[in-house]
Image (cartoon, rainbow, N blue to C red):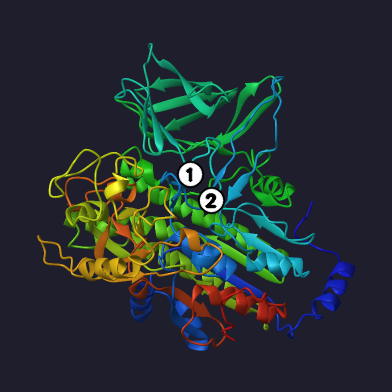
Amino acid sequence: MQVCRMGLLASVLFVVCSNLGDAEAKGRVIILGFDGVDAGIAGQMMAAGELPNMSKLAASGSFQPLASSNPPQSPTAWSNFATCRTPVNHGIFDFLRRTPQNYLPGVGFGAAKRPDLLPDGSLKDPLEYVSHRKGESFWKVAGDQGFRVKSLIVPFAYPVEDLGEHSCQLCGLDVQDIRGTQSTYFAFSEDFQTQESMAGGVRLPLKFDGDTATVMTPGIAIPGSGNQYAEVPVKFTVDRAARRLTIEVQGQKVELGAGEWSQWLEWTFELSPKYAVRAISRFHVVEAETPIRLYMTCLQYHPRAPMIPISHPHEYAAELADRYGLYKTIGWAYDTKALQQDDMTEDMFLEDVRRTMAWNEQLTLDEMDRGGFDLLLAGWTAPDRVSHMFWAYRDPKHPLYTPEMAAKYGRAVEDTYLKMDDIVGKVMTRMKDNDLLMVMSDHGFHSFRYGFSVNTWLVRNGYLAIKGQSDPQSAFTDKRFLQDFDWSRTRAYGLGLGMIFLNMKGREGQGIVTAEEAPALLAELREKLMAVRNPKTGDKVLNAVYTTVNAKGLSAIDNPDIQLGYAEGYQTAKASASGAAPKEIFEPNLDKWSGEHASSDVAITPGILFSNQKLAQDASLIDLGVTALTYLGARVPEEFEGKSLL
């Protein structure tokens, strides 16, 4: 079933109808999005002759830094891109969102509903993903006007949208795993004594009886059982002399040596006699001698039977499995947590990057060759993930930098840019004369050398109070999620990667700051925060502090009163981001997650915008959708905040 193609008659009818828009159609639009590509690095590589295809675009069309969202973090930035609106209207400000009434934070952008079963064991309601984002995507607007759209793994373009009869969509970020998490990997080892849950992963002990070990692998939580999971046995048989393992899962058998990946394996987790969840995963053998060590990807949606739809039309995900075989469906496509916790090696991670970028490339080029579209969008998140995980090895000032790691991995970030350039070149050979090509990224990147505990700073300066502790110079709490703060003595608190909220009377459940007091308090906080320096280095910590008074928009209630804009080398410390207030204000970043952008000052964190045609300068993320619709001859909704760059 070729769901992304249309017949000759339909094509003729479409051309007639599509020319009835408010503007004249000029041709097709292709937008390639590469998460986290930094304008400065791209410019340096072009000057060195390393990005010939991007340089060709810059010479014949245009190249400029692309203004990101404020804050310049991925869910916010891609929402700016999709909706052509700013956060105060689309409502995505951070990975976390607060609940003013009770201060309990939740996921910032959306979550999947978990299965709920009827007494007979059947599924009570169809499962769905609920997004907090407000506003339609510009490609949805195009599809509603009869234009043929192909949306391929665009970040945060989820849940699935009905783009029309002759359009198709495969979702990427934020498709979750069957557990309802961004990605929960599995590690198996003889070194593990008991099952242990890690941040983003589960460690399972391998206990061999002779040459075999069987591990009950937990999949999806059983509804109504608390923390019990449906399990499937996995049998491991080892040949230590040959350094090979055989893995058996539900009638499937694979044999692997050290450093090898398995093919995709299929799983079925029965939650009742009437309802089961299917999933896929892959194994990688890390060590095939003593101790045996294996890594397994998260249990992700089966493309032929996804728990929640991941494509439009629904059959498109299965069609791609028929076309290519089983493929990665998890939105968080690269297992950063496994690498952070040494359950995955750097070489494994980079091999997975190459494989996944190549699959996305194949899909994009194939859909271009198949034709039948007016607007095509395709996304790659690899540059962002590699930048997060390998930045320390390109920054001699980072606490984790060593010459040995720099020699081996110091060009890992640039390697993703080289692949980007190769992909762009292949797309350029498939362009038609009237096509508009835009190549963009959502934000730039910086080193993350030190964490700054916003909440601890607020405590030390008398703006935030801890329950049962009266001395602001020693008070602290490791309890997360804002649950250990004394709201009767708190005027301001931090949550997420760079947000500060005033404890407003009438807005927060136990607010004490009046509307009359708020402007002066914001000005005072801004002045003091801008003066903060790291006592160990003398560095200025914040490049900018953005304050908001009486925000207006569809999501004004969620708009932070202060958005921090960090200088190079600094971000919010993780404990503070989760709503705690640890003892120290500053801490060196000793995590492999060593590059960051999430709350860097937007003014110094632009992405990139290349085009094969001349575009106006001072471009922002909210402008690209307006530009695409204008080029197509489509009507641009009045609520869009961007401008056309044509």
Measured from the top left, where is residue 387 in percent x and y?
35, 59
Eyeballing the image, is 510 above or below 232?
A: below
Measured from the top left, where is residue 134 in percent x and y?
59, 60
Look at the numbered disc 2 and give the secondary structure of its residue.
loop
Crowding near pointer 2: few (<14 within 10 Å), some, many (20+)? many
Q: How many marks?
A: 2
Q: In the picture, residue 286 is in which quadrant?
A: top left
The amino acid at mark 2 is Asp
Regarding residue 34, the answer to whether it shows in the image is no
Report whether 73 appears left or right of 129: left
Eyeballing the image, is 422 above or below 465?
A: below
Look at the numbered disc 1 and give the secondary structure of its residue.
loop
Eyeballing the image, is 326 above or below 404?
A: above
- Whichever of labels 2 and 1 marks the residue nearer the N terminus, that label is 2
Label ID, residue 208: none
The residue under the point 42% across, 75% down is: 51
Whether residues under marks 2 and 1 lie with C-beta atoms below 8 angstroms apart, the answer is yes
Q: Nearer the viewer, residue 406 or 610?
A: 610
Read off the residue under disc 1: 182
Extreme-top residue of the structure:
209
Report whether 147 appears left or right of 620: right
Measured from the top left, where is residue 407 in percent x and y?
23, 58
Q: Nearer the viewer, residue 9 or 355?
A: 9
Q: Quadrant of the C terminus?
A: bottom right
Crowding near pointer 1: few (<14 within 10 Å), some, many (20+)? many
Read off the residue under disc 2: 174
Report whether 634 appears left or right of 281: right
Regarding residue 30, the answer to whether it shows in the image is yes
The amino acid at mark 1 is Gln
Measured from the top left, where is residue 376 in percent x and y?
65, 67
Q: In the picture, residue 433 is in which quadrant?
A: bottom right
